[in-house]
Structures are given as C-alpha cells and as structure tokens.
Image (cartoon, rainbow, N blue to C red):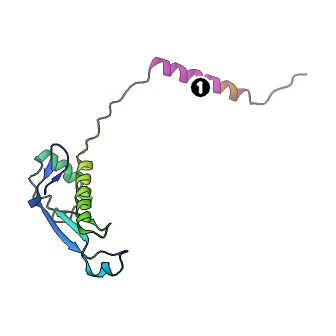
Amino acid sequence: MPIVVDDRYTIPEHELELSFARSGGAGGQNVNKVSSKVLLRWHFAASAAFPWEVKARLWQKLAGKLTDEGDLLVTSDTTRDQHQNLDDAKDKLAAIVRAALFVPKARRATKPTKGSKRRRLEEKTRRGTVKRGRGRIDVEE
C-alpha cells in the first residue's frame, strides 16, 4: 500500500523495503520469539515520486537522516503488534517527508511607524529624566 504524504505526493510501495526484527523492551517471553519491530527503508535516491526541484530541497533537509546509499530508514517498535508497528513506521515516514516539504514564508523587512519612533524617543527622554534625578543633589548655603 503506497504512503500518502499529502494531497500532491505519494510514495509508491515498490520504493519501500520492509524488514522485521525482534524488539526489545517489555513483552516477556513474547519478545524472544516474535519479530514485531519494523524497519522501513525508503530508497530516496532512486525515488521518482517527486520532481527534481522538490527532491533537491528534500535532499538538503533530510541530509542528516539519509544513509550513504541515499536511503531513509525508519523504525518502530512501540507496540507488541507487527501490523501496528508497520502503520506507525509508515506514519513516521510520511511525517518526516511532510516536515521536509514545508517551505517557510519568506520574511520581509519592515520599517517602524512614525508613532512607534515617537513613543520610543519619548520613553528614552522620560527614562533619562528619571536617571538624572538619581544623581547627587548639591545643597547651597
């Protein structure tokens, strides 16, 4: 079953590689005999799911999470059920790619208004007056 990242992009199933391993943690005897941990590997470098400009941005954002071969590895061993872990791993992969696809809005520099400049200068004058009043007072006789 393909992974739907958002309404525009879907990762096809043939680009995914699944493997299972024995999971650590709680579970008693079950841990030693059932391979419930899911290792989901997405062959990102060979993926045709994204246009090249989007793929370049993803490559830059996911650089720390990719293997030397250009694969993204996601694991899940939160539950004792293999199917729930598989769903969790797919959700994690979709969330990672969705976060990397997010393009922040460009920040535009703005200028302070005349009113804010006036208020700032008035406050500076007021503070200066207060500080001047704290000085030594000369008593003339």
Task: Name the residue located 70 percent from the left edge and 27 percent from the top edge.
Answer: 132
The residue nearer to you, when weighing 127 against 5, is 5
Residue 131: quadrant of the picture: top right
The residue that label 1 is drawn on is: 124
Q: Which residues are magenta?
A: 107-127
Task: Name the residue located 31 percent from the left edge and 78 percent from the top edge.
Answer: 31
Magenta span contains residue 80: no
State whether residue 136 appears in this view: yes
The residue nearer to you, when weighing 78 against 130, is 78
* Helix, strand or loop for the magenta stretch, by majority: helix
Question: Is residue 137 rendered to the left or right of residue 41?
Answer: right
The three-letter code of the residue at mark 1 reads Lys
Where residue 64 sits: x, y (%)?
Answer: 26, 59
State whether residue 74 appears in this view: no
Where residue 96 sits: x, y (%)?
Answer: 26, 54
Magenta span contains residue 111: yes
Task: Name the residue located 33 percent from the left edge and 82 percent from the top edge.
Answer: 29
